[in-house]
Image (cartoon, helix red, strand yellow):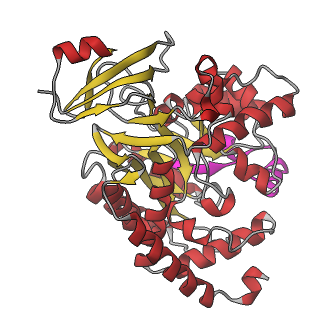
Amino acid sequence: MADLIINNAFVICLDDNKRVFPCGGVVVEKGRISYLGDSKSIDKNFNSANYLDAKGSILFPGLVNSHTHLEQTILRGLVDEKSLYDWLGAIYWLRSEMSNNEAFVSSMLSCAEMIKSGTTCVVSHQSAKHDEVGVKALDQSGLRGVIARFMCNYSESEFSYVEDVKTSLDKTCKFIEKYNEVNGRVRCAFGPIGYPYALPQTWKEISEKAKQMEVLVHSHISENEKVVADFQKKNTSDVNELFKLGALSSNTSLAHGVFLNDNDIDLLAKTQTSIIHCPSSNMKFGLGVAPVSRMSNNGVNVALGTDGAPSNNSLNMFHEMKIASLVHRVYNRDPLFPSVMEVLRMATLNGAKSIGMEADLGIIALGKKADLILIDWEPSLLPKKGIISNLVNSASGLEVNSVIVEGELIMQNRQMTKFDEKQLLKETTRIQESIISRIPEKLVG
C-alpha cells in the first residue's frame, strides 16, 4: 500500500520533455515518487489510506528559496529607507540583541510565510548566535533546508558578531557535526559572510573542511560597489581571490553577484559554482542588476533567492520570479530573456542544483523526493492554456493550497499541520513590541 496518493490534478512535471498530465497524479512511497501517470491508471492499480483528491489543482514541484536569513523576518519594516551600510549596521545590531526564543519565533514566521507561498526547501545564512535556532525551525515546520552558520573574522567590519579564525572554524565544524542531516531534511553548511569579512585563512580552512566533511559553503559575493571598487584598485575581484584560495566549487553557492565581470563569470563556470540571484533585494538598495544573461549563456548555474525579509520585504518566491522575469527584460531591452521556463527553473531545479540535490528535487519524476505543491486554479491563473506563463507573471502565491515535503503534508487546505500558526502570530506581535522598545533611536531615525 502506498504512503500517499495525490490524484486528479493538472500535473506540470517541469522536466526536459515538458511533460504535462491534464488529469494525473503521483504515488508516494518512503518519501519518493514511485509512480507518475494519468488518474485512471493510478485509481486502477494503487490504493492508500492517504488519498488526496486534487481535482481543481495544479501539482507542481516545490519551490527552492536558495538564499535568505530566517531569523531576520521579525525585523521586517523596522529599518527601511536607508543605504545598504546604514541598514546593515542597524539590522546586524538588532539581530545580535535577539534572544534565542525571539530568533526562533522569527525563524518560524519565515517558515510559515514560505510554506504558504509554495517553498519546500530553503537555504538560510543564519546568525552564528542563532545557528541551532535555524535547525529547530526547519525541523518543527517540516521544511527541507540548509542552515549555513555565519562566519566573520574581520574585526573592523560593521557586523556585530565577530569570531577569530580558530573559534569560528571550531564552532562551525561542531555545529555541522551535530546537526547535519540529523533528520534527513536539514543539512548544515559553512556560511562565511563574504570576502574579505571572512579572512583568507578562514576561506582556505573552509575549502578543505567542506571537502572532507562533504558539506556545502554558502556566502555572498560582489554585492555592492564599495567592496568591488576596493578590489578593482588592486586589479582583482572577490571572485578571483576566492578562486586563488581554492574556495570555488560545485559545493559552493554565492548570493547576489551584481558586479561580476567576464573573468569572474568564467571562473564561476569553470568551477561549477552557483550564483543565487536576489533581484528584489538588489533593487531595494539601488545596487544594480546582476548579469544573469551573461552568466546563463556561459554555463553558470543561476538560482533564485529572496534574501532576508527586511531587505526584500517578502519571502514569496512567486513574487521573486515575476521580478526576475521583468527586470532583465527591461535591463537588457530584450523581451525574450529570461523565458518563463528559465525563471521557473531558477526557482526549482537550479536551486536544487545549487545545494547538490538536483538528483532528488526540482522536477516531478520517478524516484524524485516528493517535495510538491498544490496550486488552485484561481482566476489569476486562467486560462489554462497559458499556465506556464501565468505561474510566473500572474500568480501571487496565495493560490498555493497544500505543501508536501518528502511525502508529508506540512500544509493542507492553507492550514499548517506541524505547528499552531495562530499562536505563532500572537508570539510574533508580543516579541516585536519588545524588540521595538529596545531599539536605540539612532538606528531607526
Q: In the image, is residue 242 above or below residue 140?
A: above
Q: In the rendered image, which quarter contains the N terminus?
A: top left
Q: Position of residue 266 (x, y in %)?
A: 68, 27
Residue 193 in the image: x percent, y percent?
A: 58, 58
Q: Is residue 230 magenta?
A: yes
Query: Height in image: 399 above or below 109?
Result: above
Find the residue positioned furthest to the left.
Answer: 1
> Which stretch appears magenta?
218-244
The image quadrant of residue 158 is bottom right
Where residue 122 sits in the image (x, y, percent)?
Answer: 47, 47
Q: Quadrant of the C terminus?
A: bottom right
Visible residue check, residue 71: yes
| Quarter-of-image position of residue 104 | bottom left
The extreme right residue here reads 333
Please state which of residues 255 and 346 is positioned toward the viewer in this rendering.
Answer: 346
What residue is rendered at 15% in x and 35% in y?
49
Residue 254 relative to residue 326: left or right: left
Q: Is residue 269 above or below residue 366?
A: below
Please tell me whether residue 233 belongs to the stretch shown in magenta: yes
The percent position of residue 143, horizontal first and vertical second, equals: 38, 49
Quarter of the image for residue 243 reads top right
Q: Nearer the viewer, residue 278 or 173?
A: 278
The structure residue drawn at horizontal position 76% and vertical position 86%, both measured from the top left corner, is 442
- Residue visible at 65% across and 86% down in the picture: 439
